[in-house]
Image (cartoon, rainbow, N blue to C red):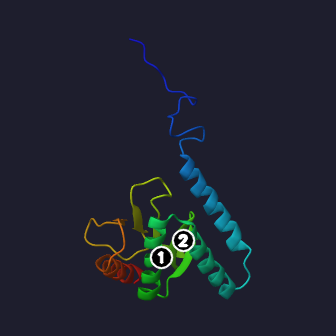
Amino acid sequence: MAHARKTAGSRTATAGESGGFTAEERAAMKERAQEVRASTRRASPAGKAAEDEAAVLAKIAEMRDSDRVVAERIHAVVRASAPHLAPKLWYGMPAYARDGKVVCFFQSAQKFNARYATLGFSDSAHLDDGTMWPTAYALAGPSADVEARIAALVERAAG
């Protein structure tokens, strides 16, 4: 029985010609490279903070309606419950950082063609609970209960 060998040219249809990354993943990496370049050109910390907040709000404004409504509420809840977290873009997503390290981020459903938006937490978040805990939450839409849960998670994550 002859065995077919995979070669560098035999990639999946979704991976394309870029070494296994989808178009959405490549776009996110390009956005991250632009974010890094932009951050090195800024002069003052106050100017950087204002530019970062404006960039996050602009990114939220670009989202389709269903994602934008959720992102606006997430932004408001994070800013109210953990005002010391600094808004910034991270791989083209609204994120909130402590001492330059991302603690939490909002991933729109549109970003990776998912069926729901996500609120994610990095390993810098203080959410450890035993030997296993969630680091991302699916968001189907805003509600008072959801916002209260997010505020509690963000407060805990921000330390």
Describe residue 73's horizontal placement relative to residue 15 as left or right. left
The single residue placed furthest to the front in the displayed view is 65
Identified at 27% across, 72% down, the residue is 129
Mark 1 and mark 2: span between their CA atoms? 7 Å
Are circles 1 and 2 on residues that touch, CB within 8 Å? yes
- Figure check: 34 above or below 22: below
Q: Mark 2 highlights which residue? A: 60
Amino acid type, mark 2: Ile
Give neighbour class at mark 2: few <14, some 14-19, many 20+ (Cα, 10 Å): many
* Residue 140, percent from left and from top: 35, 65
Q: Residue at x 47, y 63 (%)?
A: 108
Q: Is residue 37 above or below residue 11?
A: below
Residue 72 — which label? 1
Residue 24 in picture, x, y percent from top left? 54, 51
Percent across and percent down for residue 10 are 53, 29
Residue that sits furthest to the top in the current view? 1
Image quadrant assignment for residue 120 = bottom left
Where disc 2 sits, the SS reads helix
Image quadrant containing the C terminus: bottom left
Which disc, if any, is residue 132? none
127 or 31, which lies in front?
31
Disc 1 marks a residue whose amino acid type is: Glu
Say whether disc 1 or disc 2 marks the residue closer to the N-terminus: 2
Residue 139 at x, y = what percent? 36, 66
**Residue 104 visible somewhere in the drawing:** no
Q: What residue is drawn where x is 41% and y is 87%? A: 81
